[in-house]
Image (cartoon, grey):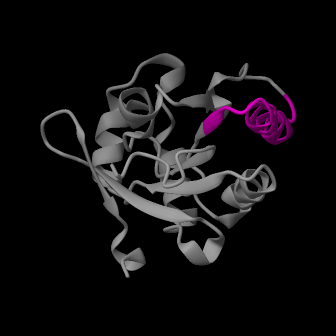
Amino acid sequence: MSPLMSPSGGLEVAVLVGLQASGKSAFYARCLAGRCALVSKDLFPRGARNKQRRQMRLVAQALAAGRSVAVDNTNPSPLEWGPLVAAGHDHGAVVTAYWFPADPVGSLRRNAAREGRDRVPDVGVLATLGRLRQPSRRDGFDTVLEVRFDGHGGFLVRQAPDERR
């Protein structure tokens, strides 16, 4: 089984966890887009209210329709990923954390190359760094996978070191 495939072959909630400009959106596009609907607060209008409620509604709608979903936000702590884990399990989905280990220097460098709305103020990246915590199975995830750049424009995906048994 590929580490990118849901262990059950059924519904999956893929929760991407990492700093801004850590590669989450590129990873989604390259590795998850073919099988998971995308939910991201970045796609909501800038002034939209109740973004969390809207996100959770979109996740529930996708799962109820039998579609796997990937949530591409920073999701730095249990406060953000806890409701996603619960929603996934409520719909019988496997919930996978895709952990992008913190590389603040690299994230700030990649973020500086962004333009317009895609660029996040450096203080925002640093604030996320202060809240970022590695997810684990103790948080309710069925699987935790670590994602790193492979140096050739792709990604290396493996079982997170703290999760190997």
Residue lying at 55% horizontally and 46% vertically, measured from the top left: 124
Q: Which residues are magenta?
A: 49-69
Q: Nearer the viewer, residue 62 or 54?
A: 62
Q: Quadrant of residue 103?
A: bottom left
Q: Position of residue 33 (x, y in %)?
A: 47, 27
Magenta span includes 61: yes
Magenta span includes 84: no
Query: Going by the image, does 137 lie left or right of 54?
Result: left
Query: Going by the image, does 132 lie left or right of 65?
Result: left
Q: Is residue 100 above or below residue 62?
A: below
Residue lying at 63% horizontally and 72% vertically, measured from the top left: 139
Q: Is residue 164 above or below residue 29?
A: below
Query: Going by the image, does 31 lie left or right of 79?
Result: left
Residue lying at 65% horizontally and 32% vertically, measured from the top left: 39
Q: Position of residue 81 (x, y in %)?
A: 67, 57
Q: Is residue 129 above or below residue 150?
A: below
Q: Quadrant of residue 154?
A: top left
